[in-house]
Image (spheres, grey):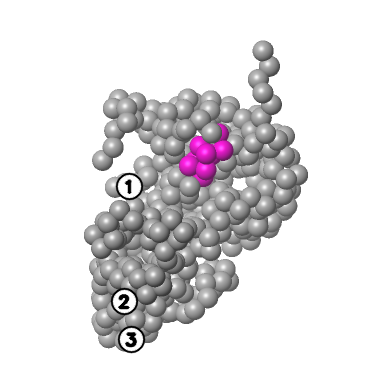
Amino acid sequence: MSAAPAPPGEPALLRYLLRLGDSSLVLGQRLGEWVGHAPAVEEDLGLANIALDKIGQARLLLAYAGEVEGRGRGEDEIAFLREHGEYLNPVLVEQPNGDFGQTIVRQVLIDAYQLELYERLASSTDARLAAIAAKTVKETRYHLRYSGGWLVRLGDGTAESHARVQDALERLWPYTVELFAEDEVDRAMTDGGIAPPLAAIQAAWSVRIDGILDEATLVRPRDRPYAWFGKRGEHSEHLGYLLAEMQYLQRTYPGARW
Amino acid sequence: MNAQIDTRVAAAWRALAAVEDPEIPALSIVDLGLVRSVGIEADGALHVHLSPTYTGCPATDVIRRTVEQTLNDIDPGRCVVTPVLAPPWTSDWITAAGRDKLAAYGIVPPPYAVSSASQLLHDERPRACPRCASVETACVSQFGSTPCKALHRCSACLEPFEVFKCI
């Protein structure tokens, strides 16, 4: 009854692509929640633009994942018709928006991570992934410029804004541990030259984050042990609510197009 | 045979040069440097390679459909349009004519060649106001009405204006 062995590297590549694609998809959905609610029209546009880039990246990555999977599923089916535990994004990206400061803190932590990641993925041995990364990294630089600029203004702003972003940083920091928690999928990617070792990204990310926090007069929280593994499909309760909203239309009107 | 191929390719370029960017209709997709190549391949079909600008740009799908329709009008049933990601599109590919059209349209063209990381992250030089030419201007938002533009404001004439981002 044993299934035919999958081609070497294929399942790990599929899982890796889903981790990348789901990270952008879920974050894009979260940022889209700000449309019409941001504190100023410029920030409404800024967050919506970043959301669009994220969803564009997710489309490229999930379409590729569908081809690697080889079951005929396209980007939309993968994005809208999977179950909670099949999403492989780290738990950080699904955390609620909170106030504008908390959204900015989450964004800085992820932008800095994706910048270091995609800079290295641009020289992946996987040509398709390298092309997506080379495209993505240029946009991510703008995203970090936006989020980093706001974190400095809020952190080095009023006593109230400083307190709020420091509080958000304490709240979100524990979730960053997962970004660098290496498992067998990461090791398979590194061994194949497809993805960089997470330790290298962590070191560069850490330097970049310290620079921004320093300028923002914020204090870096201490690392603590971490129990969630979104990239293995174990999510916080927040993802379910997000998916319910995101999937509603495709579940209610299967195959709807416009 | 070769003359025939040249004619088809030249006709395709002429038609593509008339396809407007849906977000900035003053520019064609050729001005923007989105048309990577046009050629006749072994199957006898006209193959056009197109670069998307931003991954999240909603105009990408519209442009592709318009190109397919335009080419089908001049070369029915013998056209294939393929998006290409690598190398990634850069604002450096906007042609000289395209830059002039942008400026005439009131959008400051991307101000320098070569979009390196350091320029993207640290370049804070003020852009000259397209209305009064003052350099007393400031960036209001790095994200404007479309992903490719930033919003600036002139302190001299107090008018807002858009700057095409360097990417």
Residue B29 is situated, as x and y percent measured from the top left of the image, at 34, 67
Callout 2: few (<14), some (14-19), or many (20+) C-alpha neighbours within 10 Å? many
Asked whether the residues under the numbered discs 1 and 2 touch, taking CB atoms below 8 Å apart as contact, a structural biologist would say: no
Pick whichever, B157 or A233, lies toward us: A233
| CA distance separating discs 1 and 3 | 33 Å
Mark 1 → mark 2, Cα distance in angstroms: 28 Å
Q: Secondary structure at mark 3?
A: loop
Specify the quadrant that holds the N terminus of chain A.
top right
Q: Disc number at residue A35?
A: 1
Q: CA distance from mark 3 to mark 2?
A: 18 Å
Residue occupying the point 55% across, 34% down: A69
**Dividing the image into 4 quarters, which one contains the C terminus of chain A?**
top left
Name the N-terminal-most of marks 3 and 2. Answer: 2
Q: Is residue B121 visible?
A: yes
> Which chain is disc 3 placed on?
B
Give the amino acid type for the residue marked by disc 1 in the picture.
Answer: Val
Of the residues shown, which amino acid type is indicated by label 2?
Answer: Leu
Which residue sits at x=59%, y=62%? A215
Q: Position of residue B66 (x, y in %)?
A: 28, 57
Q: Position of residue A62 (x, y in %)?
A: 49, 41
Q: From the viewer's side, name the closer residue of A184 and A223.
A: A184
A78 with respect to A202 (left or right)? left
Q: Please state the extent of the stretch shown in magenta in the rendering.
A: A61-69
Q: Is residue A227 above or below residue B87?
A: above
